[in-house]
Image (cartoon, helix red, strand yellow):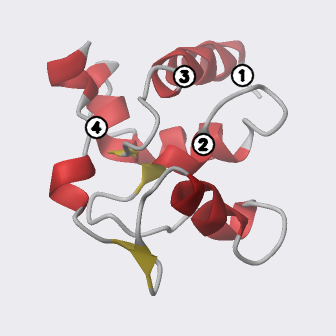
Amino acid sequence: MKPETSGFFEKVYDVVRQIPYGRVTSYGAIAKYLGAAKSARIVGYAMNGSHGKNVPAHRVVNRKGLLTGKHHFEGTNLMQQLLENEGIEVIENQIQNFEALYWDPVKEL
């Protein structure tokens, strides 16, 4: 991993740690907040590498509210279970009431 990538990952983790309990954001929103609007996929890579770093990666989903990163969690439904534990309803990998639960770091931070 390139040093600049790991530095970017740490910035991503700092943002993700600020997502409030019971709220979600998107890979693209984090990338945009960090001034790298076309780097949503890199934010996804950061989430994949975040396990064991005290980062609530389950709160980061795609721009449509889909749990596209769920296969990177242990077990078959861990990401969904973590979200549901926070009161977020998920049906067929889709967050329900996504717009109301959406947290935009550009507006919130």
Contact? badges 3 and 4 (CB < 8 Å): no
Q: Position of residue 14 (x, y in %)?
A: 54, 15
Q: Position of residue 1 (x, y in %)?
A: 77, 29
Q: Which residue is mark 4?
A: 29
Residue in the foreground of this view, choosing between 102 and 33: 102
Q: Which residue is located at x 74 percent, y 26 percent? A: 54
Report how far apart the C-alphas of labels 1 and 4 lie in the structure: 23 Å
Horizontal arrangement in the rendering, residue 54 relative to residue 11 (left or right): right
> Looking at the picture, which amino acid does disc 4 mark?
Ala
Q: Which mark is residue 17?
A: 3
Report how far apart the C-alphas of labels 3 and 4 lie in the structure: 14 Å
| Quarter-of-image position of residue 13 | top right
Q: Secondary structure at mark 1?
A: loop
Q: Position of residue 60 (x, y in %)?
A: 47, 47
3 or 4: tag closer to the N-terminus: 3
Q: Which residue is mark 2?
A: 57
Q: Which residue is located at x 45 percent, y 56 percent? A: 87
Q: Residues within 10 Å of mark 4 (few under 14, many from 20)?
A: many
2 or 1: tag closer to the N-terminus: 1
Q: Which residue is mark 1?
A: 2
Q: Secondary structure at mark 4?
A: helix
